[in-house]
Image: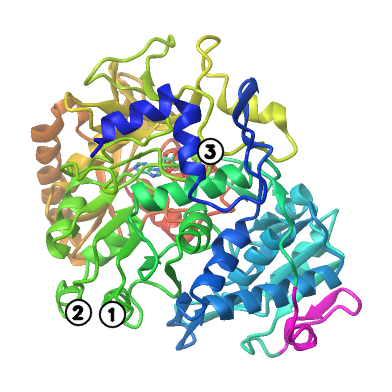
Amino acid sequence: MVGYIDFHRRSIEDREGFWRDQSRLVDWQQTPQTICDYSRPPFVKWFVGGTTNLCHNAVDRHAAARPRDPALIYVSTETDTERTYSYADLLCEVERMAAIFIELGVKRGDRVLIYMPMIPEACFAMLACARIGAVHSVVFGGFAPASLATRIDDARPVLMISADAGMRGGKAIPYKHLVDDACRLAEHPPAHVLIVDRGIDKGFARTEGRDVDYAEMRRKHVDAAVPVEWLESSEPSYILYTSGTTGKPKGVQRDTGGYCVALAASMQHLFTGGPGETMFVTSDIGWVVGHSYIIYAPLIAGMATVMYEGTPIRPDAGVWWRIVEKYRVNVMFSAPTAIRVLKKQDTAWLHSCDLSSLKHLFLAGEPLDETTHRWIAEELDIPVIDNYWQTETGWPILSAMPGIEKTPIKYGSPSFPVYGYDLRLFREDGSECGANEKGVVGIVPPLPPGCMTTVWGQDDRFVSTYFSLFKDPLVYSSSDWGIRDDDGYYTILGRMDDVINVAGHRLGTREIEEAVQTHPGVAEVAVVGVADDVKGQVPMAFAVLKDAGAAATPEEAKRLEAEISRKVDEWLGAIGRPARVFFVSGLPKTRSGKMLRRAIQALAEGRDPGDLATIEDPSTLQQIRDRLSETR
Ligand code: ATP
Ligand code: MG
């Protein structure tokens, strides 16, 4: 048995041998000749000479071997629908979708923009693109027309696929209407818009000659047989935009072969799922976690994957646990923000279900604070694994790897660098940090298989955004700040932009948030650095309480603020003590659940919060404005 340290070392020191071994986890039409071509740094091509297909690996090979095994389990608590597709069913639907795409003129290399709610047709559409070599660009459903139009103009799709409406928290969102507006705003609208009519928005408008009805087309292609298109390993599979937490989203371009191998390997070494097992990922297909771990990876591994439309607390806070029980989910993957929502609910919901099938819960997307990590691990009594990654990388950078070695979990830490990533922490001058020293999380290139190959259509932006932190050495900058302890465990301290400099001491927002969260009354908190004449910057905290009424009067709020300050003093020292702690009922987040600290900071400094196209609930900003003005 090889430990994770040796496994990782081999992946860096014998890169070719390591990834050649991993490449055997997937089917190739032509075997790769060169494993890694790094002749043009920082650009890298993986598995050169190999031809393969993501849809073949995710669907066809399993449909041939185990046609009746469940592939896609669809659960919608918005429309009260549940439906299971076997691998044979899935193949049939994907071929029909692919036949429709071909009829609508989609060819290899063309882009298809997918703007869909969490319905099975979205999965069929992604796989149909992969099947015929079209490049999908999934845009999170519900984005405003302007955001959608920007992405249309960047990707220039020949076809767009959407639905009449999405549903969220019981309310209909008229997608088709948003699509029509976006097509009007875009300079390069698609020739066709394929519409899945769910019967939710009865009165949507149809544009003659452009709009096509999916059900009608599907009927025409009952026995469609569409062969897979064998693609060169480095041909693009998709474009996906980053969450836009720090500004303008970047269009990440992904390859085909490298991605397929990286995902297959991650299912074995990290997520530990295989045929006969079920994976439930609570993300949305509009995000990278949804691309990699709702759709591609579990299917490549031959698992059943749960696609869920709904929220974690509707009809009640037991809904996810009932899915785990009913479908005997083995691997679950969610986000810290969702777990913090559940933490505010009665734990009886969790304990009333039989969760014995569950091996691991993985969490990613934001720092997982120690308090929440411990809470959920103790409630579930299984390993809860924090994993750190980015849209850019497509799969985890830092994580425990239970498929290789069952290392002890330290709460608040995403453990170790994952094989394939030559990860290091850097000082500002480009030298490397020692243990217990804060630095920028960097990856020495080449980036491993599965990571972005460039920014779509902008090679220069790829280099300038990600590889220009230092003149020398050449390093991929994650733009995040981290630290490593004596045992080799890493902690992400926040984004570089969010580092707070108090009287010459540099603190990650994460460090102060962590301390505030040790107060038992706090459910969630955001800390930002605010310009200060004397100290340079001071931290300011905005906290959501578990019991909203606990700070109802000014006296109660004052008392709680003092208690929280004491907690920070104990945990971090007075240097981290927030100048103020404000209590709010919600915090501004992106639609993928990431804290918009830059917007909070702007308000606290009396500036304009900037581009807020990705914000989930704008009223949270108003609350912050109100709290701040009460004290001015
Ligand atoms: P943009 O790059 O457009 O500003 P974004 O960085 O939020 O948006 P994503 O790729 O969705 O877009 O998010 C990746 C970022 O999320 C990471 O760089 C990191 O800041 C944060 N993150 C993800 N997982 C973790 C984790 N486990 N712990 C701490 N931070 C995490
Ligand atoms: Mg980012």
x, y percent for residue 348? 14, 76
Amino acid type of the residue that numbered disc 3 sits on in the rendered structure: Pro
Kindly indicate the quadrant of the structure image that contains residue 538. top left
Q: Which of the 4 image quarters holds residue 504?
A: top left
Measured as percent of width and height from the top left, residue 6 is found at: 29, 29
Residue that carries the numbered disc 3 in the rendered image: 449
Q: What stretch is highlighted in magenta?
A: 203-225
Dot 3, crowdedness within 10 Å: few (<14), some or many (≥20)? many
> If you read the primary sequence from the N terminus, does the residue marked by circle 2 or circle 1 appear first?
1
Mark positioned earlier in the residue sequence (3 or 2): 2
Q: Are marks 3 and 2 in contact (CB under 8 Å)?
A: no
Q: Mark 2 sits on what residue?
A: 353
Q: Residue 322 carries which label?
A: 1
Picture quadrant of residue 48: top right
Q: Is residue 328 left or right of residue 471?
A: left
Q: Height in image: 623 above or below 3?
A: below
Labelled disc at residue 614: none
The residue type indicated by label 2 comes to Cys
Above/below status of 111 relative to 488 = below
| Kind of residue at disc 1 | Arg
The answer to whether the residue labelled 1 contacts the one labelled 3, judged by CB atoms less than 8 Å apart, is no
Q: Which residue lies at the image location 61% right of the left edge and 41% below the top edge?
A: 248
Image height check: is 545 above or below 602? below
Numbered disc 1: secondary structure? helix
Question: Which one is in front, 91 or 198?
Answer: 91
Q: Residue at x 71, y 30 (%)?
A: 459
